[in-house]
Amino acid sequence: RTIERLGDLRGKRVLVRSDLNVPLDGDTITDDGRVRASVTTIRELAEAGARVVVTAHLGRPKGSPEPKYSLAPVAKRLSELLGADVAFATDTVGESARKTVAALNDGDVALLENVRFDARETSKDDGERGSLADELATLADYFVSDGFGVVHRKQASVYDIAQRLPRAAGRLVEAEFDAFRSVLATPRRPYVVVLGGSKVSDKLGVIDNLLGKVDRLLIGGGMAFTFLAARGYEVGGSLLESDQIGTVRQYLERAAQRGVELVLPIDVVVSADISADAETSVVDASAIPADQKGLDIGPATVELFRGKLSDAKTVVWNGPMGVFELAPFAAGTTEVARAVSDVEGTSVVGGGDSAAAVRKLGLDESAFTHISTGGGASLELLEGKTLPGLAVLED
Ligand code: 3PG
């Protein structure tokens, strides 16, 4: 249900929900990947003569304005990327929004202030969300859903608004949906998923779902230590979710029963200290000293993972292999990212920290088939869930 279905857009006001939730250091955007990914749809609509009104959130404010969560710096970046002025409304559905939208000419773009400054956006109450959606709907003739990173949220500007205006999926949602659909529905085999990140408790649903589908599951990052503990290893001071050991043990058994190769680190980069100048050493995964923490996968694991990826026809990678933000612990994530990008088949990077790692480490983004902008949203797709913001776009 893409933009074409809306017909001639000249002079029409189009409300676009984008995901502009970017990391900020003061007023400086430290990773503008989501803004760049949002430009395609906004530019296309503006070039079609629409009056484009963008709504988005930043961070998790508590339902009232908080200056550190203002979208003002994002409006500036959007304007640079579009090469055109972006009018910024200092509220979402108030006087500033109404005046800003009324002043738009055909082809102009406006950004409304953080929609989460209004507590109704994230309310669990249908009526409250509906009343915000009603107000947003007065600002537009059409709705375009393009914030892939929020389609798993049943929120007023994502879900309820789509029931109030003629709607369509934007180009980013379309591209993300197509990329995940091809991987999830008919993966070419071998189908290999690489999972990392700090907490296994965030990935239980994904692992559960994938154990019935993948050929190999490679596990790194902080979550690997709960798996190693489930195998009976001592993990020293590494991240460990003791309450998940039982569940993880069941996954290990299920993987074995189903013939899924579940591959864990065989060596680990350890240190007593998590800092940019930490002293590190590499130890066997079965010999992590009690006073050390595992903070990255080791070189033998990188080689093992590279081998498991080498003949893959479909790869999904979600979650870093270590504390990649710090140089002493970045090699595992860098090398696994390279191995994923070298895959001859389809390679999908599942958003969030892994997408940020690809950019931060300066890797060639074009070497991947698709780099998702959605963290939680892509995880929920991998879990096999129905996402409210996508379901509502269907007729
Ligand atoms: C994200 O950062 O994953 C999206 O922007 C959604 O943000 P949220 O988790 O605060 O809803």
Image: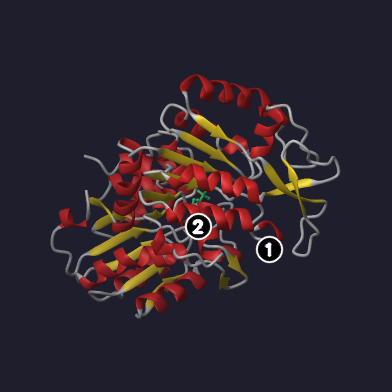
Give the left or right position of residue 355, taking residue 43 as reference.
right
Please give the residue where the numbered disc 1 appears in the rendered image. 327
Of helix, strand and loop, which one carries label 1? helix
From this viewpoint, which residue is outermost toward the right?
291
Amino acid tagged 1: Ala
Mark seen at residue 34: none
The picture quadrant where one finds residue 286 is top right
* Left or right: residue 225 compared with residue 146: right
Assess mark 1: CB under 8 A from ligand 1?
no
Colour setting = secondary structure
- The image position of residue 117, as x and y in percent, is 52, 57
Secondary structure under tag 2 reads: helix
Disc assigned to residue 338: 2
Task: Give the label, 1 or 2, closer to the camera.
Answer: 2
Circle 2: is it few (<14), some (14-19), or many (20+) Cα within 10 Å? some
| Of pointers 1 and 2, the one earlier in the residue sequence | 1
Quarter of the image for the C terminus: give it.
Answer: top left
Asked whether the viewer can see residue 188, the reply is yes
The foreground one among 111 and 389 is 389
Check disc 1: other Cα within 10 Å, few if <14, some if 14-19, many if 20+: few
Q: Is mark 2 within 8 Å of ligand 1?
A: no
Depth check, front residue: 216 or 196: 216
Q: Which residue sits at x=16%, y=53%?
A: 5
Write the residue at 25% across / 67% down: 44
Determine whether 76 is above or below 52 in the image. below
